[in-house]
Image: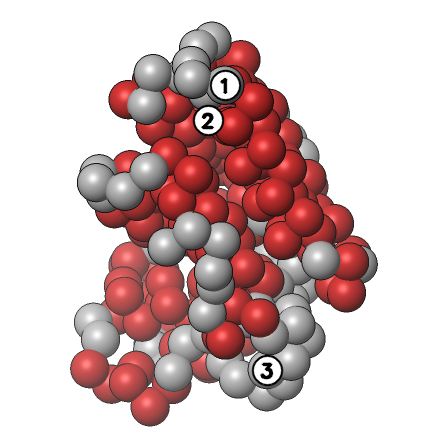
Amino acid sequence: MGTRYSKKAELSPRAIHGRSHFDRSKRRTLGVRERVLATANDLFFSEGIHETGINKLIDQAGVAKASFYSAFPSKDDLVEACLESRHKASLERLRSIEIQTTSLESKISDVFDLLLEAASKSTFRGCAFVVAAIEQHGRNLPAPRWVRIHKVAVRDAFVRMLTSAGIKPAKEIAEQLSILYDGSLVTAAFRPKSGAIQRARLMAISLIRDSSPTH
């Protein structure tokens, strides 16, 4: 796969105006919990957690208020479920890259392809976990806990890729890759035309080459 990326990934973060992350035409095929989760994933990360009220979630999801509260007794319970589902989906994509039989450079390039795809969405505002944690900054709230869980898990995925390729010290280089990963998402959110993710990918590949045992 190398350093190529798809036409979809090349789109600017603002290029897909009006396209909802959640296809409402498929809403009727989902159960109440899944319907609310899909709606919340759309609204929380496009409009903000605080800006999205319970009544709007209920209306957009097309569920009864009693059904909503039966699935999610509180808004924090819904935030928890949204972040957990995003975390699991993200790790599944990273794992699919990790187990490929391609070179380490190709794997790292593919990781940044995931970021390019995320940045192409009209709802993109940066890392969803960081954005949520900024809104929910209380110690006992779901978002600050999930941002820590997620960032450690991404770093650990890098550690495993590096270790498998014989790169040392794997943990230190994984920390550097994590900084490039996170920093490119922040920059892409606030300066969409900066090419931050593409540049971060080139920096990551250069780091890998410099750290290669055969270098």
* Left or right of 94, for residue 146: right
Displayed quadrant of residue 53: bottom right
- Picture layout, residue 55 above or below residue 174: below
Residue 211: % across, % down:
51, 18
- Picture layout, residue 4 above or below residue 28: above
At 38% from the left and 83% from the top, the residue drawn is: 23
User: Callout 2: few (<14), some (14-19), or many (20+) C-alpha neighbours within 10 Å?
Assistant: many
* Left or right of 32, for residue 2: right
Q: According to the image, label 3 marks what residue? A: 16
Q: CA distance from mark 3 to mark 2?
A: 30 Å
Q: Are marks 3 and 2 in contact (CB under 8 Å)?
A: no
Q: Nearer the viewer, residue 134 or 121?
A: 121
Q: Evaluate whether residue 182 shows in this view.
A: no
Q: Nearer the viewer, mark 1 or mark 3?
A: 1
Q: Are marks 1 and 2 in contact (CB under 8 Å)?
A: no
User: Callout 1: few (<14), some (14-19), or many (20+) C-alpha neighbours within 10 Å?
Assistant: few
Q: CA distance from mark 1 to mark 2?
A: 23 Å
The numbered dot on residue 155 is 2
Q: Nearer the viewer, mark 1 or mark 2?
A: 1
Question: What kind of residue is marked 2?
Answer: Arg
- Picture layout, residue 76 above or below residue 120: above
Question: What kind of residue is marked 1?
Answer: His
**Of the image marks 3 and 2, the number of the one nearer the N terminus:** 3
Q: According to the image, label 1 marks what residue? A: 215
Q: Evaluate whether residue 25 shows in this view.
A: yes
**Of the image marks 1 and 3, the number of the one nearer the N terminus:** 3
Say which element carries label 3: loop
Residue 56: % across, % down:
54, 75
Q: Nearer the viewer, residue 31 or 205?
A: 205
Say which element carries label 2: helix
- Picture layout, residue 168 above or below residue 52: above
